[in-house]
Amino acid sequence: MYKTVHLKKGKEESLGRFHPWVFSGAIHHIDGRPEEGDVVRVLSADGKFLAVGHIQIGSIAVRVLSFDDITIDRSFWKQRLSAAFGVRKSIFPQWTNENGKLTNAFRLIHGEGDGLPGLVIDVYDRTAVMQAHSVGMHVNRHEIADALSEVMEGVIDNIYYKSENTLAYKASEDGGNGFLKGGLSTASDIATENGLKFHVDWLGGQKTGFFVDQRENRALLEHYAQGRKVLNMFCYTGGFSFYAMRGGAELVHSVDSSSRAIDITRANVELNFPSDARHEAYAEDAFKYLDRMGDQYDLIILDPPAFAKHKDALRNALMGYRKLNAKAFEKIRPGGILFTFSCSQVVTKDNFRTAVFTAAAMSGRRVRILHQLTQPADHPVSIYHPEGEYLKGLVLYVE
């Protein structure tokens, strides 16, 4: 039987609205001494059942798995994974988009958005990359992998577990990153998105190896790229760059501070556009590059890593977004288009828009909003957990 978490009086209201987090300050006491990552039952002050979930150390003390009084077992994992897979099959019928261009890279599990807080699973061709953001998901990783193999039989052959960067101590203690199913001998590191191929760096790259959340925004950039001189800042492995090239860009320059990322960017461009002289890549600090560059670019992408991972860093993050966008407004050519993003969960749409507005006002240039962007449908947001909407983007026309 699961150990029990008792809430303080009046602290059950958020669970009554199906919000999937219990904060440590809401807890009155805990029966027994559960280990971090154990499943616990959550009760109100008057003993009413509220939820079951993973307990952990930190401000978020319990991540809710179910609001029903159930056992978290193999059938639970299979049901949640099956439901998520059904949603993805609706989004990607026969794994192609409406133009028939193959896509076999997508997010299968997006944490709270799929009722599995603390878990991310991205699929790249026939390999699923699983990442735990909570100790509970780490503890249950083998059960999840078994259920995933059953649900996606015939679709995936390999499951790679990659959590050393999200749960450094715990994951390393238990053997670190590695294959839970299959292995390198059967896993191709090349996946396809809208007909374009890319290497997935799941062994040493950021997150699960690629950023599938920008798929639709990359396709939009392709629409605007014809005849333009493109600068892709914080390019990582070059996703926006090879979309721009297919869109008919005159030249594309990719910049990232990581030399490893730049090497993969070059390989990705070569994979799609062999020996194409339009592309050059630079391993350089973004702000230094923006300072020294001229005014030759008329399409700029700013897609930096998260400037704020917690609320205490919000003020400095907004200053960073203002500084970065102000430099782009200063340098972009008249008639240029700026794609600018924030992936920081604690930065709201209004926060980000205000920061970009301030940067535009500082430049004194006329700026129109052409598009307001977010994450794609395979990164769903639970209506009860608005914090899951993390990706914000603006497409701006600069006179």
Image: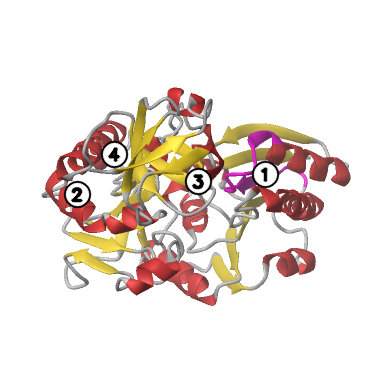
Q: Which residues are magenta?
A: 334-350
C-alpha span from label 2 to label 3 = 27 Å
* Residue 387 x/y as whole percent: 53, 37
Q: Is residue 163 left or right of residue 214?
A: left
Q: For label 3, count other residues whose C-alpha is less than 10 Å away and answer few (under 14), some (14-19) or many (20+).
A: some
Q: Secondary structure at mark 3?
A: strand
Q: Nearer the viewer, mark 3 or mark 1?
A: 3
Sequence-wise, the earlier of marks 3 and 1 is: 3
Name which residue lies at 25% across and 37% down.
80
Disc 3 marks which residue? 60
Disc 4 marks which residue? 100
Q: Is residue 153 visible?
A: yes
Residues 83 and 184: in front is 83
Quarter of the image for residue 293 reads bottom right
The verdict on residue 31 being magenta is no
Residue type beneath disc 1 = Ile
Q: For label 1, count other residues whose C-alpha is less than 10 Å away and answer few (under 14), some (14-19) or many (20+).
A: many
The circle drawn on residue 101 is none
Name which residue lies at 52% across and 69% down.
277
Residue type beneath disc 3 = Ile
C-alpha span from label 3 to label 1 = 40 Å
Disc 2 marks which residue? 148
* Residue 37 x/y as whole percent: 35, 54
